[in-house]
Image (tube, grey):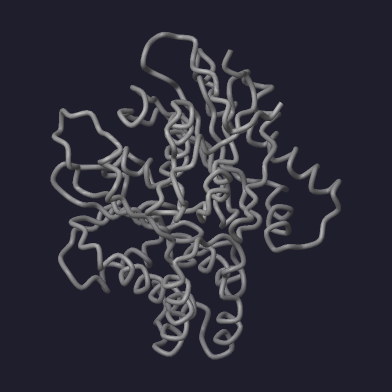
Amino acid sequence: MKVPATIRPAMPESSDMTRHVVGVMTGTSIDGMDAALVRIEGRGLDIRASLIRHLSAPLGDLQPRLRAAADQKPMTAGEFAQLVWDFGVLHANVIERLLQAEKRKPDLICIHGQTVFHQPPISWQLVNPAPIAARFDCPVVSDLRQADLAHGGQGAPITPIADWILFRDSTRTRAIVNLGGFCNVTIVPRQRAGPFSAPSTNDLRDIRGFDVCACNQLLDAVAREVLKQPFDKDGTAAARGHASTQAVESLRAMLDKQRRGRRSLGTGDEAQHWIMAHRANLAPDDLAASAVHAIAQTILDAVREYQADELILAGGGARNLALRDALCKHASNRVPMNISDDLAVPIDAREAMCFAILGALCQDGVPITLPAVTGCTRPAPISGSCCGRRAS
């Protein structure tokens, strides 16, 4: 049974300070599912997270059904109910594969679901958590955005506190650039407290996070339309192509409107008409290259004002070598640019790790969104619903 967000998920039965938490993420690109088993040590803002293992899995025959839902294709109530149930079962199957080597069940599972609509205050991260809770007999946290939306927030980006836990540093301000279906950025300020001081809510006040523009969602749309591939693996086609100044500038104008709108992005922002306007005049590789350069320039414009000491690239787009090269080419300063792998957070595992962390914070009663990030009027209460065992 799904219980209200004000009821705290049950704490693990063991008395130690270590929890094994599963986080699962499916992004707006609808290109697969990432699950991570994370060791969480400590409680509240003092938690420390380390990856035990990570698994990426395809969506199989659910992919076209989920894409149809995100594209607002008509479905009956029965079809939606079946899709939601089947997606929950797929989550359970993937988590079971992730945990095959474990001798114990997880203490907590936190799932994002598939965003099929996002227009605040209405947002739907589609999934049924009941099959997951039934199989693993542990609390399952889901629907993490709703409390923030109800308090006037955008519900996104939702990972900045988790990024702060993973990436904060006592000597430098870091910009965590997530190259997902949409690019979002977390500015993790240099840690105010000393290295041995327990963090507090004061340490969160300078965290910033914002959605920038369409990223992989747009690049994948180009690949489907003109390359006749589901995606441009490693950015190979874009690397072969030559960017068109006219196409880059027209796309930058569209992406810049997304960036300056300071709204959270969710679905339907693929700039499909940009593809249609330029596909007749550009070779497929040149269209892919133009998209990559426009996205890179838009991201750098968004990050530049925060004067970060280091850029950390994460998300599936960090594997796109053409996009990484474009970011390096257009960067106007000498700020180091690294990938999250270098900090023991694998590119493909970061978002799933973040959701494991957010689930643990929900379990500890810590609000997971920030007014300065989402625009909520006050920090929302435990920003998730729990399915499974309840606190006694």
Q: Quadrant of the image for the C terminus?
A: top right
Residue 254 located left or right of residue 125: left
> Where is residue 207 drawn, in percent x and y?
30, 50
Q: Which quarter of the rendered picture does the N terminus lie within? A: top right
- x, y (%) of residue 208? 33, 54
In percent of width and height, residue 304 lies at 25, 68
- The residue that appears at 57% across and 70% down in the rendered structure is 270
Q: Residue at x 66, y 28 (%)?
A: 3
Which is nearer the eye, 346 or 18?
A: 18
Q: Is residue 283 above or below residue 129?
A: below
Q: Which quadrant would residue 184 be assigned to in this image? A: bottom left
In front here: 12 or 61?
12
Picture quadrant of residue 86? top right
Q: Position of residue 245 (x, y in %)?
A: 39, 88
Front position in the image: 99 or 161: 161
Q: How many marks?
A: 0
Identify the residue shown where x is 63% and y is 31%.
4
